[in-house]
Structure formats: structure tokens, C-alpha cells
Image: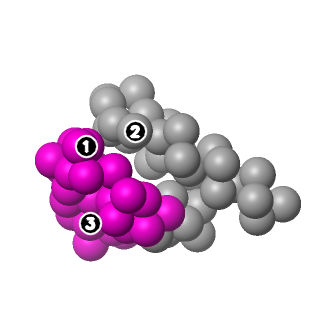
Amino acid sequence: GPLAQHMKCRQRLTCNSLQLLALKEQARAQLQHWFCCQLQLSRYWQSNENIIENCLRHHAEYLRTM
């Protein structure tokens, strides 16, 4: 359910090439869900702010190409 999906999102701390490749194989809705979840989590993970912002920038760029 939604809670399980949210907990999965909370475990995604960094973006790496394998994760990006896997995400590119998913549907647009799933990618957007991941993107929105990272936006919410960036409010809490101040210590990982740069990592999260990097991640979001990559996915924003990818969404524009879809």
C-alpha cells in the first residue's frame, strides 16, 4: 500500500547509475512518484541535501526528455 511505497522511498538515499538505469525501465507514473517522494524527503535529510538535490536534478532532466 501507500505506506509500504513511502518506506521504500525513504530507503533511497542516493542516485547511482544502476538505480537510474532501473528507473528508466519503469513507467512514467512510477518515476514521478519517486521524484515526488524525494522532494518530500529532502525536507528531512538536511545532511544529504547535496545528494538529494543532485538526484532531483538528474530526474528533472530525465523527465523533460520523456
Looking at the image, which residue is at 49% across and 63% down? Answer: 37
Residue type beneath disc 1? Asn
Q: Residues within 10 Å of mark 1 (few under 14, many from 20)?
A: some
Q: Quick one: 18 or 6, which is closer to the camera?
A: 6
Residue type beneath disc 2? Leu
Q: Earlier in the sequence, mark 1 or mark 3?
A: 1
Name the element at disc 1: helix
Q: Quick one: 36 or 64, which is closer to the camera?
A: 36
* Residue 6 among those drawn in magenta: no
Contact, CB < 8 Å: mark 1 with mark 2? yes
Looking at the image, which residue is at 27% across and 72% down? Answer: 64
Name the element at disc 3: helix
Looking at the image, which residue is at 34% across and 65% down? Answer: 43
Q: Which residue is mark 1?
A: 48
* Residue 49 among those drawn in magenta: yes
Q: Which residue is mark 3?
A: 60
Q: Which residues are magenta?
A: 37-66
In space, the residues marked 1 and 2 are separated at their CA atoms by 8 Å
